[in-house]
Every structure is written in structure tokens, then in C-alpha cells.
Image (spheres, rainbow, N blue to C red):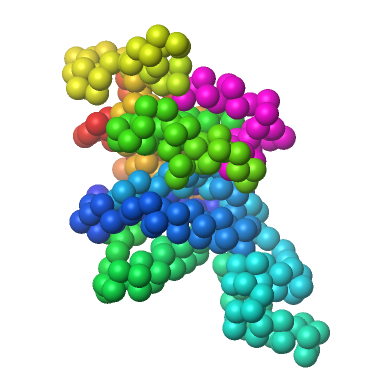
Amino acid sequence: MRFPRLKLAGRPAVYHCISRIVGGQRLLGDLEKEQLRLLLRRQAAFCGLEVITYCFLDNHFHLLLRVPAQLACTDQELVGRAVGFYGPKSPQAMALQEALAAQGRLPDDLREGLGRRLGDVSAFMKEFKQRFSRWYNRRHKRFGTLWAERFKSLLVEDTPEVVEKVAAYIDLNPVRAGRVRDPKDYRWSGYGEAMGGNRLAQRGLAGMAAGGEWGRMQAGYRAVLLVKSGWAGRSGKVALDGATIRRGLAQGARLGLGQVLRLRVRYLSDGLVLGTRGYVEGLLGEFRDRFGPGRRSGARGLRGLAGFEGLATLRDLRVRAVE
């Protein structure tokens, strides 16, 4: 059954967004990942979205985005955003600047067109993927679809405890994929970028908590990524391998947070909503028309996963929930 994405229109929210290359092809090399990174930063600044963290891999990407309440921008602010996004000499920016100078205000159609792209995760993802597709097809002299599907999204309760778990899951992708032993060594991730000194990436991760500062929280977050996710301090001892963990889970074992973060956990990508039970139940009530009449309750526990006590999702993933 195909479930709809849930979006909180006009209200602040955090989303874990995922998209994959058609056919699972590994088309994203270093150059392509760098282009995605640059486009992500430019477009997030234009749309007013906060990038908490991200990870670009060879055939898919993850974004953890905080969308603000509906933005109210003056005409001057809209033009300034467009100049930063397109460049001051671009035809789009120059046309907007000329219209503003000539009339003292933007024409309604131009203002509405720009305004629709602000603070909207669906508009952001559509444009982000389309812009990269056009760049990729020009560069590689190809045509046709690049992305396999519409993007998937998980609505994440915006509390430090919940957001940190999803962020860690995303930043550990290159470790799970065998690309690096230490997530700080992977360049195309929010954590790798932050550890390399990028201020935007540092602010994004620090923003997991209101008023958070990177200098004060980086040691704790690193402990989540390394010690709690499977590395036993300085010994270099690795947590149980994936096959052993899955076998234990099938036999009724309970996974610790370290084991969870070293596996693919569909609750964190396909669960529709992740948060406390009260948060999930509230959203079921709000989006009741999206579900069948037989649905009586919203919260579905994350079975067998220690470290996620008290959290629930909106989908009951009975098959291959942990891989």
C-alpha cells in the first residue's frame, strides 16, 4: 500500500527526505556529490529552510530539513534571496531587480511565484531534484529520468532527543556503506562538513537543540556516533555485525541504540511520522481522512529497538523493518 506524505502546511516541522537514483545505479561520483552539496546550500538559503544534516551517497541521498512557519518577506527581501540564488548578473535576478526599480514593487505574478517556493518542503525537493537532473544530463550528455521515484519523507517530532537519533542515522550512512570507519572522514555529509570546519554545517547540527552551540555539543554528538553506535572507545572494537544482529532480532532479542544505528532501519525512513506516542496520535487525528476507516489508533511502537523507548511511528512495518 502506498502511503501519502504528510506535510504540516504553514507550520514549522522537521522532515527526513530521501531520494534514489533510477535503477539503483551508482551515478553520483565526487563531482556530482559536490554539485548536490552546493545546490543544497544555495537553495536552502533561498527557500528559508534549515539543513540540520545530510548525506550524499553513490545512488541516493538523505536530507534532514527544518521548515519554518510560513515566511513573510518584503519585495526587497525576495529579490535579495533571488540574487543570492541565481547570481547578481543572471537574467532572473536582473529581471526582478528591474521590475522592482521600475514600479517600486514586484508584480503580483512574480511575487506569488517566488513566494510559493519559500518554506515548502515539497517545492524545495521538486526544484532541488530537477535542477540537479538538468545539470547532470547536460554534463553527461544524457536524457531522461534520473530519479527513481518521488521523494520519501518522514515527519520528525522537533525535539532534541528525536532529531538527534535521525541525524545520527543519516550521518552514519557512509559507515554502514563501508566507505569510512569514522563518519568525520566522509566529506559529503553534514557531520563530515562540520568537522572540516564549515560553519553552516556546524550551525545545522547545533540546531538540533534550541540555542545549541557546536562548540558545546560536538563532543556529545560524536559520542552518539562513535561510542553509542558501535565503537567501544579506544579499543577499536566494532559492534556486532549486521547478520548477527538480524539473527538475534528474529529470535526476539532487543537491539541497543548502537546496533540500530549500524543497520538500515525502515522506521526512520518509511514510518511517515516519528515521535512520542502523543505526537503521533495527534497527527493521526489531524490527517484522519488519509487513512482507512478501520484505523483506530496512530502510534505504532518500534519493536525490539532499545534507545527508542517511548517513540512510535504512524506505519506498522511488519516486514523487513530492520535490514
Number of residue marks: 0
Residue at the far right: name it: 104
Q: Residue at x 41, y 32 (%)?
A: 172
Q: Position of residue 251 (x, y in %)?
A: 19, 14
Q: Which quadrant of the rendered structure holds the C terminus? A: top left
Quadrant hosting residue 112: bottom right
- Judged left or right of residue 37, residue 144 is left
Above or below 69: residue 307: above
Residue at the far top: name it: 235
Q: Position of residue 98 (x, y in %)?
A: 72, 87
* Magenta residue check for 223: yes
Residue 154 visible from this viewpoint:
no
Magenta residues: mostly which secondary structure? helix
Write the start and end of the magenta stretch as one range: 201-225
Q: Position of residue 295 (x, y in %)?
A: 35, 41
In the foreground, 85 or 313: 85
In the foreground, 143 or 210: 143
Q: Residue at x 68, y 29 (%)?
A: 215
